[in-house]
Amino acid sequence: MRSVFRFVLSFAFVAHGLWNLGEAGLRWWQTQGHLLPTDLRFFLGYFEIGLAVTLWIAKLERYSLVAIMAIMFGAFVTTIPNGFLYKNGGCEVPLLYTLIAFDLWRRKADA
C-alpha cells in the first residue's frame, strides 16, 4: 500500500510541476501576484519534479516527504482564502497531499 501512495504522490507532483512550468501555471501565478512572485513558479515546478523522482530513492524518501509537506503547507496557506473545496481553488488538495506525505513519513519503510 505504501508503494501505491508513493506512486500517486509522485505522479501528482510531476503533473503539478509541469503545470507550474506551463501557460496555465503562469496565468494562475499572475492572479496570485499580490502573494507570490511569478518567477517562483519555475523554482517550484522543477523542485516538485525533482521531489517526485527522489521519492522513489529509498535513502532520500523521508527527506523528500518533509520537503513535500513544506511545499504543501505553503500551498495550503495560500489557498485558504478560497475556502475548502478544490473546485473553488480551495485548500482541499494541498491538505490531502500534506496528510498523505505525513502518513508516509511517520511509517517505517517497507522491509
Image (cartoon, rainbow, N blue to C red):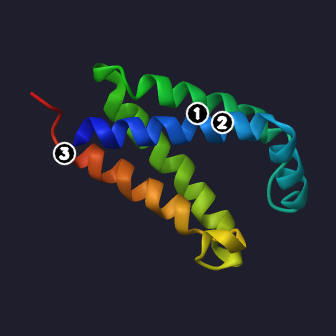
Question: What separation in Å lies between label 3 and label 1 (alpha carbons)?
Answer: 23 Å
- 86 displayed left or right of 31: left
Residue, disc 1: 14
Report helix, strand or loop for mark 1: helix
Pick the quarter of the image with the C terminus: top left
Residue, disc 3: 107
Q: Which of the two discs, 3 and 1, labels the residue nearer the N terminus? A: 1
Q: Are marks 3 and 2 in contact (CB under 8 Å)?
A: no
Residue, disc 2: 17
Question: What separation in Å lies between label 3 and label 2 (alpha carbons)?
Answer: 26 Å
Residue 94 at x, y = what percent?
A: 54, 59
Looking at the image, which is closer to me, 11 or 47? 11
Residue type pointed to by label 1? Val
Circle 1 crowding by C-alpha within 10 Å: few under 14, some 14–19, many from 20: many
Q: How many marks?
A: 3
Q: Which of the two discs, 3 and 2, labels the residue nearer the N terminus? A: 2
Residue in view at x 28 percent, y 45 percent: 104
